[in-house]
Image (spheres, rainbow, N blue to C red):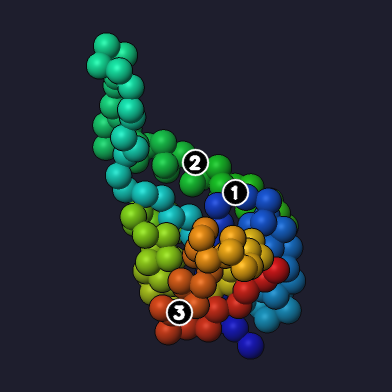
Amino acid sequence: MFKHLLVPVDGSDVSKKALKKVAQLASADKAAVTLVYVSDPLPPTVYSDSTMGYGITQKDHQKVCAAYAQDVFKKAATALGSSVKAKSLHVSNTNLSAGILDAAKKAKADVIVMASHKRTGIKGLLLGSETHEVIVHSTLPVLVLG
């Protein structure tokens, strides 16, 4: 059914649990899998008193993000199992959903497979849903695993 799955990963338990289902789907369809991790390109602002304050450079921030992304990819590949060979793509974007959509274009995926935190009601409204944002703005099908 699908030839190329784009799977956003963040290292969370929700993301890890969804990878088992992704592996089943990829194996059944003999589909390629690209894992994507989206990091914020801007270093965080550190608030501290003036005598102890310090900042992080853009270069150091990028190094930390790249190292974290590699760790997430390694753990995700382990969760997928040895039968699925996944590519990885680290994207920087201040907006998570926009980063996922950009990655889907770069990877030339034909579906985005996302895990859901299953937030509903007031929690879903107040906390927002990146999955919802991707669904609303994607021109590709989005498969939500719960």
Q: Nearer the viewer, mark 3 or mark 1?
A: 3
Tag 3: amino acid? Val
Q: In the rendered view, does 112 fall on the left or right side of 60?
A: right
Cα distance in 3D space between marks 2 and 3 = 28 Å
User: In this view of the protein, which residue sits in the foreground, 114 or 68?
Assistant: 114
Q: In the rendered view, does 111 fall on the left or right side of 100?
A: right
Residue at the top extreme?
51
- The residue that label 2 is drawn on is 68
Element type at mark 1: loop
Mark 2 / mark 1, whichever is N-terminal: 1
User: In this view of the protein, which residue sits in the foreground, 127 or 13?
Assistant: 127
Q: Which mark is residue 81?
A: none
Tag 1: amino acid? Gly
**Pointer 2: residues within 10 angstroms few (<14), some, or many (20+)?**
some
Residues under numbered marks 2 and 1 in contact, where contact means CB atoms less than 8 Å apart: yes
Residues under numbered marks 2 and 3 in contact, where contact means CB atoms less than 8 Å apart: no
User: In this view of the protein, which residue sits in the foreground, 95 or 36?
Assistant: 95
Residue 53 in picture, x, y percent from top left = 29, 19
Q: In the rendered view, does 28 fall on the left or right side of 51?
A: right
Residue 113 in picture, x, y percent from top left = 58, 72
Q: Which mark is residue 136?
A: 3
Q: Residue at x 42, y 60 (%)?
A: 96
Q: Which mark is residue 11?
A: 1
Q: Is residue 72 above or below residue 33?
A: above
Residue 97 in picture, x, y percent from top left = 43, 65
